[in-house]
Image (cartoon, rainbow, N blue to C red):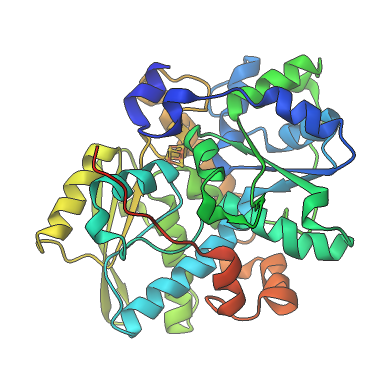
Amino acid sequence: CGQCLAVCPTGALSEVNNVSKVWDAINSDKVVIVQTAPAVRVALGEEFGMEVGSLVTGKMVGALRRIGFDRVFDTDFAADLTIIEEASELIHRIQHGGKLPMLTSCCPAWVKFFEHQFSDMLDIPSSCKSPHEMFGALSKTYFAEKMGLKAEDIIVVSVMPCVAKKYEAARPELSEGSSSDVDIVITTRELALMIKEASIDFENLDDKEFDNPLGESTGASVIFGATGGVIEATLRTAYEFLTGKTLENVEFSSLRGMQGIKEATIDINGMSINIAVSHGLGNARHLLEKIRSGKANYHAIEIMACPGGCIGGAGQPFHHGDLSILDKRMNGLYKEDRGKTLRKSHENPMIKKLYDEFLGEPYGEKAHELLHTTYVARKKI
Ligand code: SF4
C-alpha cells in the first residue's frame, strides 16, 4: 500500500494477511490470548463508519470476546512495564557513565533501520523489548505459571497498528527455544475484517473491560501511540524515581505535536536532561548523524518510523496523508490519558504485583532475561 511504501522499510512490503491463522488458532484446543496496542483503540472505529478519533476501547474488548479469544488483555499493561524498565535503564546509564543518548526501541521499523544504517552504534538503543514482545514473554511464563499451563499450550495474538510487528515477532532474538514470545500479529484493519466476518454489530456493542492480570494500565501507557508519548511516559517515572518527589504536572507539552523533530530540556532536581523526539526515518537519520559526528548532547531520544507515531501506522485504517485524521487520533489518546485515575506507569498496581511476585527488581536479572533483547549489525542497503 502507499502508506506502507512511504513509511516502512521492513515487513510492510511483503505484508501477509494473518486472519485465517487467527481463526485456526481460535478453533484449536490451545489457550488463545489477545493483546491490543494503544493506537488501535482510536482508529478501529473508523472501519465501522464511526467518527475519526473515536475511542472504542470497551467495544473492541467486547468484539474480541465475541470472536472467541480465551483472554482479552492489553498491550498498555506491557507499555507500563516497558516504561519501568526503560526509565530504570536511563537512570542506570546516567548514574554509571553508560552510553548516552539512550534511544527508545519499541518501533521495529526503526530498530531494523539502525541495524542496517548505523550498525556502528548498536550500543545506544535501549535494550528493552517492545511492549507487545514483553507481553508475549510474560504470557508464556508468568501467566502460564498462574494458570498451570505450559508455554506451548498458549497462543499469543497481537493486534497492532503496524505491519513491521509481523517481522519483529519472527526475530530469533525474540524467541525462547522454538517458542516465539508472540505467535501471530494482525493489524487494526485485519481485526476489523475479523469483526465483519463474525457478523458482529460493532457500533452497538456494550463496553467491556480487559481481563487481568495483564489488562490494567495507566494513562502513561496510552500515550505510547502518539509521537513523543514514550519519552513523556518515561519522564513521568524517571522524575519520581530520581527525586522521590511527586510530579504534579504530568503533561510535557513541549514533547507533543506533529513537528518532525522536537527538542526539550527538562530539569530534574537541578539536573538538565536533554530530550529529542522524532517521527519519520528521514528525521531519525538526521539525529543519528548528529550523534555520530559528536554534535549532539542528548540524554534520551524517542524515534518512531511512522508519521505521528503508531497512530499513523501502516496497519491502521488508511489516512492517505491527511494530518487532520492523525491529529484526531492523537487527541483521542490524550483524552484517554486525562481520563485515567493513574497516569504514571510505576503506579499500576498489577505491575507492582508482577515485580513482587515474579520479576524481582526493575532492570534486575529476571527482567533482563525476559524483557530485554539484543541487536544485530546488518548489511547497509
Ligand atoms: Fe510500527 Fe509504530 Fe513503528 Fe509505525 S511507529 S513502524 S506503527 S511501531
Camera-side residue: 228 or 374? 374
Q: Is residue 157 above or below residue 53?
A: below
- Residue 112 locus on image (x, y percent): 37, 45
Q: Is residue 259 above or below residue 228?
A: above
Residue depicted at 81% across the width and 18% down the height: 198
- Could you tell me if residue 340 is visible in this image? no
Q: Is 54 on the left-hand or right-hand side of 302?
A: right
Q: Quadrant of ligand 1?
A: top left
Quarter of the figure with the N terminus: top left
Left or right of 32 on screen, residue 271: left
**Is residue 324 something that shows in the picture?**
yes
| Residue 200, position as x, y percentages in the image | 81, 19
**Is the residue 25 above or below the residue 276 in the image?**
above
Quadrant holding the C terminus: top left
Q: Nearer the viewer, residue 143 or 381?
A: 381
Image x and y of residue 245, in percent: 47, 81
